[in-house]
Amino acid sequence: EAGVAQSPRYKIIEKRQSVAFWCNPISGHATLYWYQQILGQGPKLLIQFQNNGVVDDSQLPKDRFSAERLKGVDSTLKIQPAKLEDSAVYLCASSSVGQRAKNIQYFGAGTRLSVL
Amino acid sequence: SQQGEEDPQALSIQEGENATMNCSYKTSINNLQWYRQNSGRGLVHLILIRSNEREKHSGRLRVTLDTSKKSSSLLITASRAADTASYFCAWQRAGGTSYGKLTFGQGTILTVHP
């Protein structure tokens, strides 16, 4: 089966600009996650969707970050405006409902964002 | 860290040697998982151990879990250069409304020299 697809792979922007990341999860996976991974650290969950509904966005900086998952498939994460501290790798992951009890997650390759 | 820790932060060994990484967490858990991340790539699931299990094997991987000490260890036996990567533990908190959320440790960078 095809894995989790993310684009773009790399993005360089100036601070205060806007940026958007796209994710296409594994077909049939109801749960989708966006993580922020700062260099040298483990991934930090930003937002979790179950189908097209948000189940956890407690660590999403809502003044500048937004995410949507229309039709319960693809998802977009946006940052507006970006700050220097947003430089990180943004990872998308998905998991199937059947495995939710285990919650094994499948990750995309990520988008590396550099804010200058 | 308020969530947990992994140690060592970095580990350098020769091919054929064993590598041991440790993880500590601070909450009650349903399960604990280990993931590998190669440079510039996403994370790949390696192994899961449930809270009522004490040890689990998968190929050259051995995971132990001590819920009384809130700690886990990952042992990679007979390491290969291809095992060079960052290794992360992640735990699923028990109870509440976590919706299966995983919390990740800080990771251990493993370098295996040919």
Image: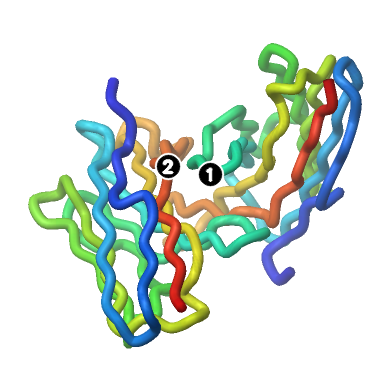
Determine the residue positioned at 67% across, 54% down. B105
Pick the front one: A115 or A104: A115
Determine the residue positioned at 43% across, 64% down. A113
The quadrant in which the N terminus of chain A is found is top left
| Colour mapping | rainbow
- For disc 2, the neighbor class at 10 Å (few under 14, some 14 to 19, many from 20) is many
Position of residue B79 in the picture relative to residue B59 (left or right) = right
Q: How far from the left and from the top, in percent, is residue B62?
A: 76, 23
Residues at marks 2 and 1, CA–CA distance in whole angstroms: 7 Å
Q: Which mark is residue A109?
A: 2
Q: Place residue B49 in its image quadrant.
A: top right
Chain assignment, label 2: A
Position of residue B58 in the picture relative to residue B12 (left or right) = left
Pick the front one: B35 or B63: B35
Pick the front one: B67 or B40: B40
User: On the image, numbered disc 1 is attached to which residue?
Assistant: B40
Kindly indicate whether the residue at mark 1 contacts the one at mark 2 (C-beta within 8 angstroms). Answer: yes
